[in-house]
Amino acid sequence: MLAEDTALLDAYSDAVVRTVEVVSAAVVKIDIERGRQGQPAGDRAGGSGFVFTPDGLVLTNSHVVGDARRITVTLADGQTLRGDLVGDDPDTDLAVLRVGATSLPAATFGDSRAIKVGQIAIAIGNPFGFQCTVTTGVVSALGRSLRARSGRIIDDVIQTDAALNPGNSGGPLVTTRGEVIGVNTATILPAQGLCFAIASNTARFVVSRLIRDGRIRRSYIGVAGQNVPVPRQIVRAHRLAGATAVLVVSVEARSAGEHAGLREGDLIVAFDGRAVGGVDDLHRLLTDERIGAAAPLTIVRGVALVELSIVPAELRK
């Protein structure tokens, strides 16, 4: 092997080692017990997470701690603590826990907008319960979309080929500078090298809301819909931005949709001036900022283009 090659390998190894030494102290193992309180022990499962504030706040995946009646967090030094759920958002697959400890090593969030395809990505977690396992790879792609278990789309997802296995969920994806750029969340089986992480900028936003409110507030208009093609002659006649829309299948009684005058069979083609090509587009637009704020809703009714005014309500789960 050439001296230059050896030097490059040594530099790569040194970068990974330094990162692991910095970040691994903040990575935790999470064990959960599912089932209702007062009943026999239910299913047990586990995953990963990481401390992001010295006073004991831990970030993990929603699917790791969902429906848990007991959460146990094992720190990198072996200390075992009870985890209390601060907030949970299945739509972005993120959850925040609190443990009763202070002065903990904490990982630092990086800017996921600043990363580039091809740069080194390091995943740290607990696959199959093997604590503090490290895998490396590169950022394979940016801006992916991934469907959460709740059915909603998670945008701006990072794709990596750093190997992830069951138990890695909730662990950090980090750069060689030791900054968290993603929260490891999913793999595609049986494919190899197709792994995904929720971008750190998404995580920071969700974390701030979960700490403040315990949940993410979203708006809704009270309709059930499905994606359908719009007849070509209607697209041309009204110069629509897209050839698909949301068909209103039903309208919930006393909902924002009913108050606005929506009817079964209407095609939603735009909301607040932005094109709606499907249910996922509508979900993306119905943010917490829309709650209680009137906005124009453009529909096709029959062959006519109609504009309604709608006031989205807060989605309650």
Image (spheres, grey):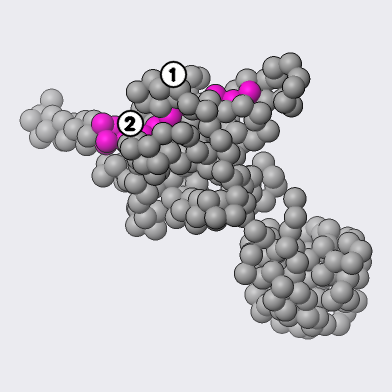
Q: Residue drawn at (64%, 64%), measured in percent from left and top?
A: 287
> Which span is picked out in magenta?
19-33
Residue at the image point whose x is 52% and y is 39% from the top? 97
Q: Left or right of 12: which side holds 222?
A: right
Q: As drawn, is 133 to the left or to the right of 314? A: left
User: Looking at the image, which residue is at 62% across and 69% down?
Assistant: 289
Give neighbour class at mark 2: few <14, some 14-19, many 20+ (Cα, 10 Å). Answer: some
Foreground pick, 63 / 209? 209
Residue at numbered disc 1: 130
Q: Is residue 264 above or below residue 132?
A: below
Residue located at (53% from left, 51% from top): 211
Look at label 1 and name its amino acid: Phe
- Label 1 neighbourhood size at 10 Å, few (<14), some (14-19), many (20+)? few
Residue beneath disc 2:
25
In depth, the one of 71 and 243 nearer the eye is 71
Q: Is residue 298 left or right of residue 51?
A: right
Q: Is residue 102 visible?
A: yes
Q: Quadrant of residue 126?
A: top left
For badge 2, the amino acid type reads Ala
Residue 236 percent across, percent down from the top left:
75, 80
Q: Is residue 64 magenta?
A: no
x and y percentages locating residue 265 in the rendered image: 90, 67
Residue closest to the eye, 136 or 183: 183
Pointer 2 or 1: first along the chain: 2
Of 257 and 143, the residue lying toward us: 257
**Residue 27 lies within the magenta run:** yes
Q: Between tags 2 and 1, which lies in front?
A: 2
How many numbered circles are shown?
2
Which disc, if any, is residue 81? none
